[in-house]
Image (tube, rainbow, N blue to C red):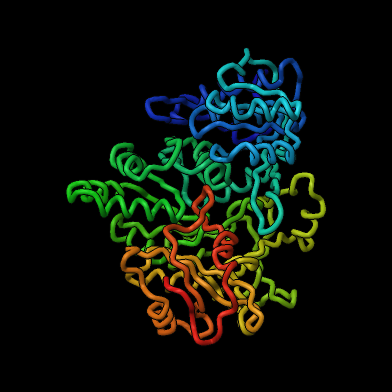
Amino acid sequence: MTEAQGIPLLDRARDFAERAALEDGDLHLDYAGLLRESQRIAAGLLDGHSDLEQARVAFLVPPGLDYVRVQWGIWQAGGIAVPLCTSHPAPELDYVLADAQAKIVIADPLYMETLSPLAVARGVRLFSTATIAQEPTPLPRLGPERLAMIVYTSGTTGGPKGAATTHGNIQAQVEALVSAWGWSRDDRILLTLPLHHVHGIVNVLCCSLWSGATCRIHASFDAGRVWRAFSRAGLTLFMGVPTMYFRLIKAWQEASKAEQQEWSRACRGFRLMVSGSAALPESVLEQWLEISGHTLLERYGMTETGMILSNPLDGDRVPGAVGAPLPGVEVRLVGDNGEEVSGSGEGEVQVRGPAVFREYWNRPDATTSAFTGSWFRTGDISRFDGKTYKLLGRASVDIVKTGGYKVSALEIEEVLRRHPRVEDCAVVGVADEEWGERVVAAIVPTNAQRAPSADDLRAFTRERLAAYKSPREFRQVSSLPRNTLGKVTKNEVKALFSDSNSAGDDGPRGEA
């Protein structure tokens, strides 16, 4: 018996044996081939042993067929998959190897030179994807309680923490999304997301393979290439982050009239387009609707929990809102007083259910502090109106406490983006003796030579927001600092204002 048993995601693949599982350029792999080739990688990892027994296997492989072969090979051998980010420098890769206590490292030949000295220094076995495979051998029987994956997530302080999920956790996450978003074997999805985050790993890759669908993979995001795939690949689904949709819109605007018509027509063939991992500006939602005919489905989740809330597949999608709890997910809001918010109101989102991760790897104190009883504390603040949830931001960086008021940075950003000469922005709070925190904003102008003045921006926001929400200071930047998923890194934005002094009530200083 070579097949690993007890992992439904892999067991289901036998039902879709001859169907196309993966496409990468001109390369194709059906489900039978994916099972067969990943079993060969599992044999190489086991190297005569019967079970990796949850050994951590870190792997640095770009998105593509090899990535999935390796991921499934690790799982079939009984290991814990630890995906590494292809854009991270050596010190960040080494941090993950040390923190995860990796026993084995697998690298694409492109990255062997980078990982070899790290593996040698830490005394871990290093395999190349080009040479790891062996003839299949008997594989261990696994259960849902086995740890399957450690994905690293950055907090606001300290180094990244490894969120450890079981096979049962992943199954619960996938089943909820397949049910809520109507996945079927007839779907074809384009994957352009990085594969060291759950957005790409679970929402796209695992849901596609669970359903017997086909996943077409691009190793990186390129707006022109994505538009061409939309036109030619017979796709039904696309999931991206707001930055991707922004770039797709820009590419469409710069295209010829004939290309615009062709690309917009291609979008009509999709059944669903989803945005997540960061707040979607309403202006982007409106532009995308005009171009594609699709109202993007916004959802909300975390590395530790999988997806929590989602707008409906069928029915009204409220701009700026993230919908209602997904199947099998329990959600509550908790106020500053620690009491559950009854009915409509604002509070911290807390969640429980079978999709919630088991632990932060090797950090029992962090795990304990992340929970209140069985409820995971997300640190995100949301408003519930009785039907749908709207995120106000993270308590640590998106909620600014100024002059006794709690202000949502996301609300202010949405207003600023509607200024005709503002392309993008980020709002944060910085320490202030008088106000506790003062609201400040980094602005990316549409034209650096015609950037709006601070007075112009202040007047614009005060016409639309209460005075205490209007930023007191603006800084013009050419671009905002972002991570690999396109999320703005707010602590880096705060650093832009580290040399500024307290701003009085007479408004912002400096030009934006």
User: Height in image: 314 above or below 67?
Assistant: below
Say which residue appears at 76% left-offset and 26% top-offset: 123
| Image vertical order of residue 386 relative to residue 29, above or below | below
Q: Is residue 67 above or below residue 409?
A: above
Quadrant position of residue 47: top right
- Residue pushed farthest left? 258
Expressed as whole percent of the image width and height from the top left, the position of residue 102 reads: 73, 33
Residue 241 image point, x, y percent: 46, 53
- On the image, the x and y values in percent for residue 193 come to 48, 44
Residue extending furthest top? 135
Residue 398 in sight in this render: yes
- Residue 479 lies in what quarter of the image? bottom left
Above or below, 59 against 254 in this view is above
Residue at the image point whose x is 52% and y is 47% from the top: 484
Residue at x-position 75% and y-position 74%: 338
Q: Is residue 316 left or right of residue 160?
A: left
Residue 168 at x, y percent in the picture: 68, 43
Quadrant where the C terminus is found in the figure: bottom left
- Say which of 382 and 460 sits in front: 460
Residue 286 location, quadrant? bottom left
Residue 317 visible here: no
The quadrant the N terminus occupies is top right
Q: What residue appears at the point 18 percent right and 51 percent down from the top-left corner?
A: 257
Q: How many marks do you count on the picture?
A: 0
